[in-house]
Amino acid sequence: MDIKKQLEEKVFEMEKVAKLFGIEPFDIYFLGGSACILAGYSHRATRDFDFIDLEYPSKLGKVFVHLRDFDMLEYESTLISPLYKKRSMRLEKFNHCA
């Protein structure tokens, strides 16, 4: 299975768990290599999900635990453009975690 499929499967697993536990849909903004692969801009291998910490509630731990086989980095100390939401691209494949 190629890396894009692996990354997509992880996000689909997160969606399934969120629905199973009755967790409301939530935003997640991926950065770096995983974002480029999921958006189709790159095909290089990466084993991490970089995302912006939106101060998620603890109940989302049940969802984020599905990234445990990957390196999960939260960008709390990195400069992020204040326009990141405006510049972001919605991944239409995903309905619950988007």
Image: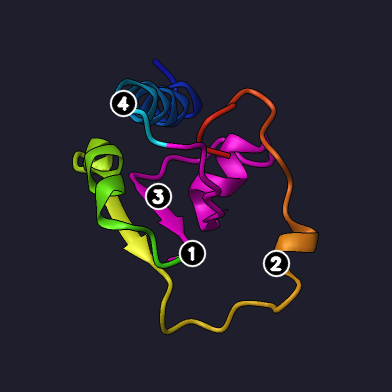
Q: Where is mark 2, residue-wise?
A: 84
Q: Which mark is residue 97?
A: none
Residue 79, above or below 41 = below
Q: Which mark is residue 17?
A: 4
Q: Residue at x 74, y 46 (%)?
A: 89
Which quarter of the picture shows residue 10?
top left
Q: Nearer the viewer, mark 3 or mark 1?
A: 1
Give the number of marks.
4
Q: Quadrant of the C terminus?
A: top right
Label 2: how many residues lie within 10 Å, few (<14), some (14-19) or many (20+)? few
**Mark 3 → mark 2, Cα distance in angstroms:** 17 Å
- Image spot of residue 20 (x, y percent): 31, 21
Q: Amino acid at mark 4?
A: Val
The tag earlier along the polypeptide, 1 or 4, is 4
- Image spot of residue 58 (x, y percent): 25, 55
Q: Where is mark 3, residue-wise?
A: 49
Q: Amino acid at mark 1?
A: Ile
**Mark 2 → mark 4, Cα distance in angstroms:** 27 Å
Q: Which residues are magenta?
A: 24-53
**Tag 2 near tag 1, CB within 8 Å:** yes
